Amino acid sequence: SLAQAVARGIDSVEGMRVLVAEDNEHKQILMELLLKKQAVQSVKVSNGVEAIENLRQNSYDLVFMDLEMPVMGGFEAVAAIREDEKKMGTRMSIVALSAHPPEEQREPCIAAGMDDFLMKPIDVKALHAMLRRFAPAGAVTSKAPTPKDMLRTANVYRDAPLWVAAFHSRNAGD
């Protein structure tokens, strides 16, 4: 709850850079809003090819990768990204995004080289936990909350279910 967050200090992932690979424009906007509310910078791409090209030119703290996209899906993109990383000696944290239940998708995602799995529709608390888990060392801090922090946190938790509900009512079955 907000009161618990205020009591322990607000965990900040502010300033993280995240790449979101998602083909659905409405879901891109939803992710962008959820990330922006947590002061996370995000860049959106619409398929796996764009994700690979973007990662070759830019650096991010985390990638959220939809599994089913046109041109190239998440599984194929991650395989190519992991091959690039072998050559460069680096490793990017990649979290799969899927509307399919975790019990069906988590194991194949991990086996394919992804680091974790986040189910759509996105749960705000699960998203924040994922950001904290993959934040660069020293990026996540606990600090005494300012009034602005409290308002931002309250708005995220208050508004997110409305965004998700509105999104799903307009895009039933997607």
Image (cartoon, rainbow, N blue to C red):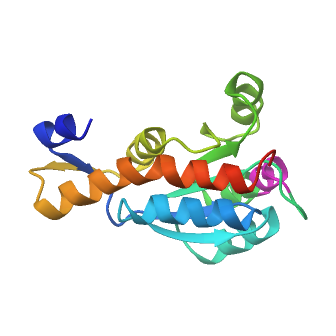
Residue 115 in view: yes
Q: Residue furthest top?
A: 103
Q: Can you give x and y, in whole percent of width and height, for residue 39 in the image? A: 35, 65
Query: Is residue 130 a member of the stretch shown in magenta?
Result: no
Residue 56 falls in image quadrant = bottom right
Position of residue 125 relative to residue 34, above or below, is: above
Magenta-drawn segment = 73-80
Instruction: Name the side, left or right, on which 15 lies relative to 150.
Output: right
Report the predominant secondary structure element of the magenta stretch: helix
The magenta stretch spans residue 74 = yes
- Residue drawn at 21 percent across, 50 percent down: 141
Residue at figure coordinates x 38%, y 62% from the top left: 37
Q: How many marks?
A: 0
In which image quadrant can residue 57 be found? bottom right
Query: Quarter of the image containing the N terminus?
Result: top left
Judged left or right of residue 72, residue 95 is left
Q: Residue at x 62, y 43 (%)?
A: 121
Q: Nearer the viewer, residue 121 or 118?
A: 121
Image location (x, y in percent) of residue 47 = 79, 65
- The residue at the far bottom in this view is 57
Residue 139 appears in the rendering: no
2, above or below 17, in the image: above
**Residue drawn at x 70%, y 40% as measured from the top left:** 113
Left or right: 149 as drawn, with respect to 137:
left
Picture coordinates of residue 174, whole percent (x, y): 80, 49
60 left or right, relative to 74? left
